[in-house]
Amino acid sequence: MIKVPRALFLPWPMGHHFGAPFHTTLQRRVITEAFQLLETAEASGTIVALPIKWADVRREAKQLTSQGRSL
Amino acid sequence: MMEAVESLKQDPRETGEQLRGGLWHTINQRYPGSMITKADYVPLARLSKPLHQSRVTLISSCGVHLKSDRPMDVCHPLGDFTFRRVPSGAKHADLIIHQLKYPHDDADLDINVIFPIERLQELAAEGTIGGLTANFFSFIGYNMDPERFEQTVAADIANAVVDERADVALLAPA
């Protein structure tokens, strides 16, 4: 345990910490949620879990691929 | 066909169970001394200025670097105790991943999946964040000597981040 001061926890597969390819809205959301922690964390060791399931991410990513564009 | 489906249900890759359950529970038990363990939490540092005035840097263990840069050593049994500077203005096409320890098929399609450099460029351009440091930082997460890692890669990146006058550092594991 490194015991970081604050962290956003994403229960997603390795290599996908900012979401899925071309899913720009989700990639942005992960970053902005992490930045929010800079302002909201009250104590060191704060870990916030982002309530987004990988199954939903994958479904949205498949739609993106089939439409050939980013969200 | 039904047998194939049944065997898939037993497949540890599907069930998430260890191949030889009960042998070890943590990475440190499996590879003693390979993980950094801290007794105390890092003190919480408050933002010194609003986010829209803050200069942001990105530090990642994903092993990404410029295609023109020296590749990471992914073969050494102890790992590679160096890091790479990635210009914050770089685009996906300028970059390559040298790291074998995580699947980067999707990151090869879109580097922002693991190293969101273009999203940070957009956030800086629209003023959500104050700006970006000239360089971001990358290394490979496979380093089997945590003490040496802390004294070399971690210390060197920390010094470089101070030199680049970063207000905020986004750390991303891979």
Image (tube, coloured by chain):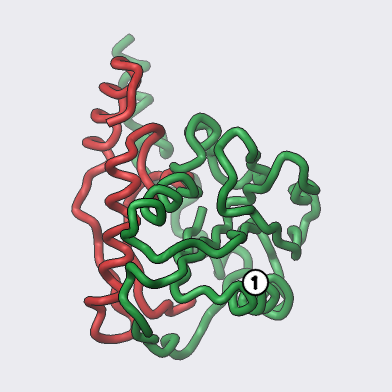
In which quadrant of the rendered view does residue A43 lie?
bottom left
> What chain does badge 1 belong to?
B
Relative side of B141 to B69, left or right: left
Residue B24 in view: yes
The chain coloured green is B
Q: For mark 1, what is the residue?
A: B157
Q: Position of residue B3 (x, y in %)?
A: 34, 16
Q: Position of residue A49 (x, y in %)?
A: 25, 61
Relative side of A56 to B103, left or right: left
Task: Identify the image quadrant of the C terminus of chain A.
Answer: top left
B64 vs B144, nearest the viewer: B64
Residue B33 in view: no
In which quadrant of the rendered view does residue B143 lie?
bottom right
B47 vs B124, nearest the viewer: B124
B41 vs A31, nearest the viewer: A31
Relative side of B156 to B10, left or right: right
Mark 1: few/some/many CA within 10 Å (<14, 14-19, 20+) = many
Relative side of A48 to B162, left or right: left
A19 above or below B155?
above
Residue positioned most to the top: B1
A63 above or below B110?
above
B25 above or below B161?
above
B8 above or below B156?
above
Q: Residue at x 53, y 80 (%)?
A: B37
Q: Which amino acid does label 1 sit on?
A: Ile
Q: Residue at x 29, y 32 (%)?
A: A58
Q: Position of residue B35 (x, y in %)?
A: 58, 71
Q: Colour of chain A?
A: red
Q: Where is residue B127 in the image (x, y as percent from the top left)?
A: 34, 58
Q: Which residue is drawn at 74% across and 58% down?
A: B79
Q: Residue at x 62, y 65 (%)?
A: B31
Q: Is mark 1 on a helix, strand or loop?
A: helix
